[in-house]
Image: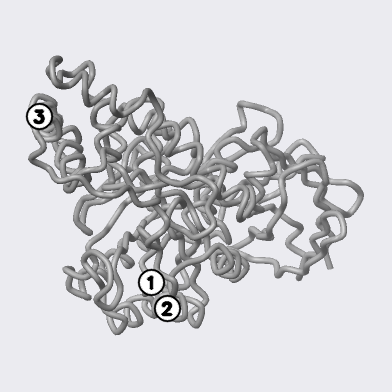
């Protein structure tokens, strides 16, 4: 547990639940930032990929009824009205096709040729790119090169019939997701995040096309939704390719492929009985393919997360009620989400908000001092507050004679009860990092 204790390094220590007390020295008061928002024991994020229609027609109403927020990783280029759609960034494709007639595909030119292959107007182009991407993700570059070599050879000899190019978002479902709907669902508390512009294998793209997918999906989300929609992303197919992830991490702080922070170094995908690495401050534990998992096992993930203190359970869903990859039924979804909502030990939040909390907490400083009969708390972090704007949960030792505490920060004021454990007494409350001090007044 991260404890930020006064201004003396020698007094930094991890506190147990009953360890709150006024500090010796007269004016300073013991305060810490809770590991999770609202001092919960663990966190859960419910995430969806690809933006298939039943995620919004079926899943969102269930989540709204239960008060659960979701994160939707969408391909921004497929929504009607998007400014940036699928395109190849680079020299003319015809030049690449012509060059491939005499220059074999190798590990040097593979990325350019793979990036261009999706936009060569022949039947099956996307399938060749997909198969090459699978091989690159698996670390089998020679096989990926062979697939691209075969593709360009067939383009040259006319084996693959030509087709008319189609704009990426021209085939968007007229009853599906629109930017107006995105803004409405965002107002309801859900998060929309980048699944890139066109859902490519990022590991198979060259730098220019990788950056286009990353940057333009972010720009579209910023333009259509606002800055809070620019924190989260998931590179398609869950790639763990180091090259792709390194590029993505420069653009999106909350990367579901893995953030590799010193306090959250990897994604755990183990079974329920062993997801926790105690030496990690935080563990992101991803679970997917819910449709193929028994309900008792899925509930076990929730129980495990609530039973530990450093676990962030990230659920990954694609299809719903027959539409999309590996669809989950609405009946199972309702039962499972109800189980999550009933667990008061867990904080269920969007992927972006959990990342915000974790990164703010790990970068924050807090101090508390007596001022007359009040306690004055100062809390701040150096992160960009336009993006990292989530309140943190503080736990401050108070006078055991107090029965309740009025918490004032700027124009906001709330009253919280005094919590007790033996002779210790403390208040747990929300505070916004920044320049406004927090004043605790007892009664």
Q: Tell me the crowding category of disc 3: few under 14, some 14 to 19, or many 20 or more residues within 10 angstroms, Cα based.
A: some
Earlier residue among tags 2 and 3: 2
* Horizontal arrangement in the rendering, residue 112 relative to residue 306 (left or right): left
How far across and how far down the image is residue 156, in percent? 13, 30
* Horizontal arrangement in the rendering, residue 443 relative to residue 264 (left or right): right
Which numbered disc, 2 or 3, marks the residue closer to the eye? 3
**Distance from the alpha carbon under mark 2 to that under mark 3:** 44 Å
Mark 2, residue position = 57
Mark 3, residue position = 153
How far across and how far down the image is residue 21, in percent? 67, 50
Residue farthest along the right direction in this orientation: 372
Proximity of marks 2 and 1: CB atoms separated by less than 8 Å: yes
Q: Give the SS element for disc 1.
A: helix
Q: Give the SS element for disc 2.
A: helix
Describe the colour scheme in one phrase: one colour
**Looking at the image, residue 279 lies above or below residue 333:** above
- The quarter holding residue 129 reads top left
Screen quadrant of the C terminus: bottom right
**Looking at the image, residue 174 lies above or below residue 88:** below
| Residue 53 badge | 1
Q: Give the SS element for disc 3.
A: helix
Q: Residue at x 60, y 70 (%)?
A: 184
Which numbered disc, 1 or 3, marks the residue closer to the eye? 3
* Horizontal arrangement in the rendering, residue 307 relative to residue 420 (left or right): left
């Amino acid at each position: 547990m991260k404890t930020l204790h006064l201004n003396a390094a020698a007094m930094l220590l991890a506190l147990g639940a009953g360890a709150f007390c006024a500090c010796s020295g007269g004016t300073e008061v013991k305060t810490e930032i809770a590991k999770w928002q609202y001092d919960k024991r663990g966190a859960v994020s419910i995430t969806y990929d690809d933006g298939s229609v039943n995620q919004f027609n079926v899943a969102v109403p269930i989540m709204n009824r239960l008060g659960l927020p979701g994160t939707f990783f969408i391909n921004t280029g497929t929504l009607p009205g998007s400014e940036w759609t699928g395109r190849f960034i680079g020299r003319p494709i015809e030049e690449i096709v012509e060059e491939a007639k005499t220059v074999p595909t190798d590990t040097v030119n593979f990325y350019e040729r793979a990036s261009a292959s999706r936009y060569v107007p022949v039947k099956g182009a996307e399938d060749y790119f997909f198969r090459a991407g699978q091989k690159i993700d698996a670390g089998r570059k020679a096989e990926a090169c062979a697939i691209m070599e075969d593709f360009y050879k067939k383009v040259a000899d006319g084996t693959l019939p030509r087709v008319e190019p189609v704009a990426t978002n021209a085939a968007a479902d007229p009853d599906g997701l629109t930017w107006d709907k995105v803004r409405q669902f965002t107002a309801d508390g859900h998060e929309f995040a980048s699944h890139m512009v066109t859902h490519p294998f990022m590991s198979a793209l060259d730098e220019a096309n990788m950056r286009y997918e990353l940057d333009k999906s972010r720009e579209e989300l910023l333009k259509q939704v606002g800055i809070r929609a620019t924190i989260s992303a998931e590179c398609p197919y869950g790639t763990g390719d180091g090259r792709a992830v390194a590029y993505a991490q420069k653009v999106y702080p909350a990367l579901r492929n893995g953030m590799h922070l010193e306090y959250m170094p990897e994604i755990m995908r183990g079974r329920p009985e062993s997801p926790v690495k105690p030496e990690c401050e935080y563990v992101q534990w991803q679970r997917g393919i819910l449709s193929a998992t028994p309900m008792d096992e899925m509930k076990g993930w929730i129980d495990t997360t609530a039973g530990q203190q450093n676990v962030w359970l990230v659920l990954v869903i694609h299809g719903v009620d027959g539409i999309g990859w590996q669809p989950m039924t609405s009946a199972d979804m309702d039962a499972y989400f109800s189980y999550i909502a009933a667990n008061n030990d867990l904080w269920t939040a969007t992927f972006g908000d959990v990342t915000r909390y974790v990164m703010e907490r790990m970068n924050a400083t807090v101090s508390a001092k007596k001022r007359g009969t009040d306690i004055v708390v100062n809390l701040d972090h150096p992160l960009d507050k336009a993006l990292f704007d989530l309140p943190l949960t503080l736990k401050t030792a108070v006078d055991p004679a107090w029965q309740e505490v009025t918490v004032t920060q700027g124009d906001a004021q709330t009253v919280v009860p005094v919590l007790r454990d033996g002779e210790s007494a403390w208040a747990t409350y929300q505070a916004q990092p920044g320049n406004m001090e927090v004043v605790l007044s007892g009664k």
